[in-house]
Amino acid sequence: MGDHGYGAPSGGLRSTVEDLAKFYGAFLQGINNQFEDGAPSSGTSTLKQLPQVTSAKIAIDQPSKHESSYAFGPSARWHAPRWQRNDFVSLAEKAVTKNLEWHSSVVEDLKKHQKSGTLPKPFEQYVGTYWDQQQIFKIEVVHDSGTLYWLIQGLDNEKFPLEHYHDDVFTWLRPRNELSRRGRWAGWDQEAIFWIVHFGVDDDERIDRLTWAHDSGVPAVTFTKI
């Protein structure tokens, strides 16, 4: 609370449709229970104070839910006006077809710029922990059973194999279905460069950094090995 405003908790996560269905099923059940009981929690659920989370922050008849929530935005029917007929089924089918072309396009682009006949250094030389300049974001590189992996933020659920591309460059692109199953966004805004990891060397030819363009339209970030 401050600066003439009022803040309340909200949530954001990256997940799969299956996981989200479970989460929001529990979310809706918790909302109904807590509104009926007037309690801040329900049963063994870890979701607390849901009436406050879902209630409008413009103070009219609080707490409230449904159409009174989130600053009285327009109802869903006005997002698709009935006087403007649209073939949403056809548009969805075209979008699916276009999205399914993304992975093969990235693979083709990677092949186009790949050098042939180069070998990586021994994998152990790439192993280590790499930090960005602000010491906020880290990447761990490990060697296990003949395969090199990188772990984004050191998380096991963000562990992906690194396949040699050329020189000291690797790619972490996986099959599209695997990326989707793991909750990774798979779409046209992630070009080939997003899936490439460049390792750099010092004056003694020892690996001391890696560079990764983590988003479209921004400069690649250098992570220093510690």
Image (spheres, rainbow, N blue to C red):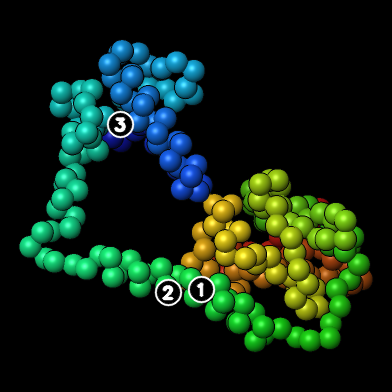
Task: Note whether 62 is above or below 109 in the view shown.
Answer: above
Q: Give the residue drawn at x 84%, y 86%.
A: 117
Q: Tell me whether circle 2 and circle 3 mark residues in contact (CB < 8 Å).
A: no
Compute the Cα span from label 2 to label 3: 36 Å
Compute the Cα span from label 3 to label 1: 37 Å
Chain-order first, disc 3 or disc 1: 3
Mark 1 neighbour density, 10 Å: few (under 14) some (14–19) many (20 or more): some
Q: Give the residue drawn at x 75%, y 76%.
A: 165
Residue 210, percent from left and from top: 74, 65
Q: Give the residue drawn at x 41%, y 17%.
A: 42
Judged by depth in the image, the label closer to the viewer, 3 or 1, is: 1
Chain-order first, disc 2 or disc 3: 3
Residue 144, percent from left and from top: 85, 54
207 on left or right of 220: right
Which residue does the numbered mark 1 point to in the structure image? 102
- In terms of secondary structure, where does tag 1 sit? helix
- In terms of secondary structure, where does tag 3 sit? helix
**Residue 21 image-quadrant placement:** top left
Q: Amino acid at mark 1?
A: Trp
Which residue does the numbered mark 2 point to in the structure image? 98
Residue 197, percent from left and from top: 70, 68
Which residue does the numbered mark 3 point to in the structure image? 54
Q: Give the residue drawn at x 12%, y 58%.
A: 81
Quadrant of the image containing the N terminus: top left
Judged by depth in the image, the label closer to the viewer, 2 or 3, is: 2
On the question of residue 216 being in view, the answer is no
127 on left or right of 220: right
Compute the Cα span from label 2 to label 1: 7 Å
Q: Tell me whether circle 2 and circle 1 mark residues in contact (CB < 8 Å).
A: yes
Mark 2 neighbour density, 10 Å: few (under 14) some (14–19) many (20 or more): few
Residue 175, disc = none
On the question of residue 58 being in view, the answer is yes
